[in-house]
Amino acid sequence: MQNRFSKLASLLFVLLLALSASGWAQDITKGSITGIVHDASGAVVSSAKVSLTSPFGDRTTTTNSAGEFTFANLNPGSGYGLNVELTGFTPARVGNITVGVNRTTTQDIVLQVSTAVQTVEVTAAATTTIDLATTTIGADISESLYKNVPVGRNISSIVNMAPGVTDSVGAGAANPSINGASGLENQYIINGANVTDPGFGGFGTFTRVFGSLGTGINFDFIQEVQVKSGGFEAQYGQALGGVVNVLTKSGTNTYHGSVYGYFEPRNFEAERPDANPLLENVSTRLVNQGRYDFGGDLGGYLLKDKVFWYGGFNPQYAYSYRSAPPPFGNSSLGEIWMWRGGW
């Protein structure tokens, strides 16, 4: 009995250590804001009250003896603001701060000696500075960028926007070559979970016959994609190429949603030429194609500042219209269509 109790106590101790270690570590699906508070002479200001406002709730901390403050494990996105107060100084505010996935945003603040009841407010957007806490080479691609440039409505098109990423040819468009490695040497993470195919190294499920079978993440559900092409931290392993870190959208303290639709009817497509008369071995002709992509999403909160929810529905359909060459008997069937859909 005593031996069994000792084993149970040891197991509980190990679990507590694991939970403590996870609490100390920065979640790779989150970001952070850090900075130093100075006075007008450049001296650091300690014990200043720093308040963080955001769509996900508010937080408060104080600067340490070096004037530093940090807010860790923040949901990536825009709408963050900082308020700094200390007796004898004019309160300062900075708004429009954007937090990137798995990145540290640095925002230093200067306090002016108070001469009257007033507040210094920085109305311009906080500038994005170099993250000095990491040695990673790559790119952070947010929704504000890929929704405003002409890219395909799939996650592969977003990844290919990063420098050092190119088509790997043999591994398919879903598995690009990053920094010169093959398309099956990358690591793929979605919301902190490793979704790399354990057998082949592809993005999601991968087979020899059909290639990539997808990841289940629709284009409009993506909030930010981080591509690490080199120098990534020791916490990432099993990758000779690059690391693709994908974060999906979440709810906030306000309800928000959208309805969208993208249609490419075959009637809007120009006539495709028939190359069969020029070929010695004729083949099935692709006459037209049509695509339909529509859906909606909605997000909000269950408990304000604590529990959020987000959901969406995005069916996609693709049609191809083909005809057999005249020498074959089934050419009498005329045009036939093939359907492919997804959710």
Image (cartoon, grey):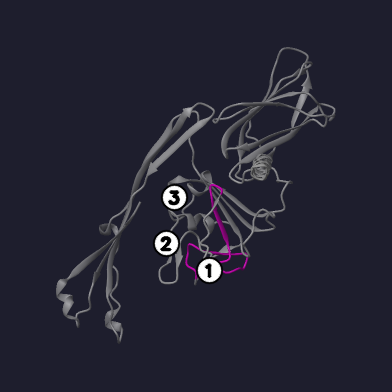
Badge 1 amino acid: Ser
Q: Which residue is mark 1?
A: 168
Q: Which residues are magenta?
A: 171-192
Q: Which residue is mark 3?
A: 219
The image quarter containing residue 338 is: bottom left
The residue at 46%/29% (across/down) is: 302
Q: Which residue is mark 2?
A: 213
Bin the neighbour count of mark 1 within 10 Å (Cα to Cα): few under 14, some 14-19, many 20 and up. Answer: some
Q: Earlier in the sequence, mark 1 or mark 2?
A: 1
Dot 2: element: loop
Q: Main secondary structure of the magenta part?
A: loop
The residue at 42%/62% (across/down) is: 213
Question: 299 and 198: which one is in front?
Answer: 198
Dot 3: element: helix
Q: Earlier in the sequence, mark 2 or mark 3?
A: 2
Q: Is residue 306 above or below residue 199?
A: above
In this rendering, position of residue 194 left or right of residue 338:
right
Instruction: List x then y, in percent, for residue 89.
Output: 77, 18
